[in-house]
């Protein structure tokens, strides 16, 4: 038995999803002629109560397009020190967008709005001007933390006061919604640009979108083409995303319940803190985790190693109850 807890990106399309993909009506999306891509973009825009959405191959591309829309070269973005946009996108904000970033430190990935205001540089003759703030929800390295909607509203008020743009890295906004019950439209209302991933918990093989207003979406298509993200008969991929949105959002609560069960079962072995689990991510803290992970992998249980004494486990639709029990048995035995 293989139980792959390294990421929620490892899922493979279900039979029904593959069927939806092969049945897709397609065209050339660079010409705007792929009906399935157009339908997906319209559906996701509508879901978030925004004017438009732009389909991209990856979440990194959706994020970087969002940042480039809000911040010009030589200007500044604020985000937290563990944010995906500055740590896991190969320096793209600087390398491709010419964007300077400044970070605040984060308690468990959770947004602390008062930390941000002192970092904001207003336009003046010598300082790098701050143009936008990026937030991650759920927060990946924070351990799947859900940003409280009250904090997001406070942040919007702060951004409005200073005339700043707000970008949401919503790779796992589906999980935030499932855990908090906050409507997608509310997230759409609070942010100028929102990236969402179809290939994480939703289980599509490929695809993300940037959701925004009509004017920015037009510019987003230019930046996407510039980055090499103009795809042709992408409707086969968009069909997987449409299927995932229709069928896989409601089941995310199952992943969350399994993550909590996994954490509660391993907490007595000192591997994790179950009270920190809010969605489908469990942070593992143990000295010498690399050896533990290697030994677990030999028994079919894969976890992510992120530092010398910590790592990560994620639940997703390719992990069932039997898989969780197997992981608990293997990791529990190795840790004791
Ligand atoms: C996965 C992820 C992304 C996008 O990653 P890609 O691999 O480029 O699709 C963006 N933000 C967060 C927080 C993520 O976890």
Image (spheres, grey):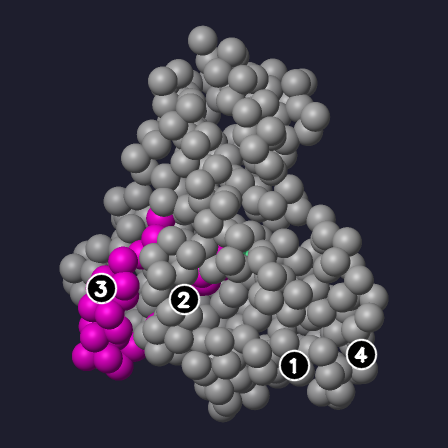
Q: Which residue carries the number 1 mark?
A: 39
Q: Which residues, given as a range, are shown in magenta?
A: 145-173
| Horizontal arrangement in the rendering, residue 218 relative to residue 282 (left or right) | right
| Horizontal arrangement in the rendering, residue 297 relative to residue 325 (left or right) | right
Q: CA distance from mark 3 to mark 4?
A: 41 Å
Q: Residues within 10 Å of mark 4 (few under 14, many from 20)?
A: many
Quadrant containing the C terminus in the rendered view: top left
Q: Nearer the viewer, residue 253 or 301?
A: 253
Going from N to C along the chain, the mark reached first, 3 or 2, is: 3
Q: From the top left corner, tell me how far across and down residue 52 is, in percent.
A: 53, 84
Q: Which residue carries the number 2 mark?
A: 168
Q: Residues within 10 Å of mark 2 (few under 14, many from 20)?
A: many
60 w.r.t. 226: above or below:
above
Q: Which residue carries the number 3 mark?
A: 150
125 w.r.t. 100: above or below:
below
Q: From the top left corner, tell me how far across and down residue 317 is, in percent.
A: 60, 45
Going from N to C along the chain, the mark reached first, 1 or 3, is: 1
Local SS, label 2: strand
| Horizontal arrangement in the rendering, residue 64 relative to residue 317 (left or right) | left
Q: Nearer the viewer, residue 256 or 306?
A: 256
Going from N to C along the chain, the mark reached first, 3 or 4, is: 4
Q: From the top left corner, tell me how far across and down residue 315 is, in percent.
A: 53, 40
């Amino acid at each position: 038995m293989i139980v792959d807890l390294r990421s929620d990106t490892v899922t493979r399309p279900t039979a029904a999803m593959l069927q939806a993909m092969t049945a897709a009506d397609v065209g050339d999306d660079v010409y705007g002629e792929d009906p399935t891509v157009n339908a997906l973009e319209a559906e996701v825009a509508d879901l978030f109560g925004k004017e438009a959405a732009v389909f991209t191959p990856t979440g990194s591309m959706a994020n970087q397009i969002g940042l480039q829309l809000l911040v010009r070269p030589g200007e500044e973005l604020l985000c937290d020190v563990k944010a995906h946009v500055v740590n896991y996108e190969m320096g793209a904000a600087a390398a491709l967008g010419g964007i300077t970033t400044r970070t605040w430190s984060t308690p468990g990935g959770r947004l602390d709005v008062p930390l941000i205001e002192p970092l904001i540089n207003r336009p003046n003759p010598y300082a790098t001007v701050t143009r936008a703030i990026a937030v991650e929800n759920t927060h990946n390295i924070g351990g799947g933390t859900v940003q409280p909607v009250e904090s997001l509203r406070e942040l919007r008020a702060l951004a409005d006061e200073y005339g700043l743009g707000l970008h949401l890295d919503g790779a796992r906004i589906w999980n935030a919604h499932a855990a908090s019950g906050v409507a997608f439209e509310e997230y759409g209302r609070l942010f100028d640009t929102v990236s969402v991933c179809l290939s994480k918990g939703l289980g599509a093989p490929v695809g993300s979108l940037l959701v925004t207003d009509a004017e920015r979406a037009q510019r987003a298509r230019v930046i996407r083409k510039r980055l090499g993200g103009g795809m042709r008969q992408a409707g086969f991929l968009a069909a997987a995303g449409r299927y995932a949105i229709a069928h896989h959002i409601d089941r995310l609560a199952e992943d969350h319940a399994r993550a909590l069960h996994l954490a509660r079962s391993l907490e007595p072995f000192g591997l994790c803190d179950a009270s920190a689990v809010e969605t489908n991510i469990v942070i593992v803290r143990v000295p010498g985790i690399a050896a533990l992970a290697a030994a677990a992998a030999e028994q079919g249980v894969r976890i992510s190693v992120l530092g010398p004494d910590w790592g990560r486990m994620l639940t997703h639709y390719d992990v069932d109850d039997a898989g969780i029990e197997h992981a608990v048995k293997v990791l529990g035995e190795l840790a004791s």
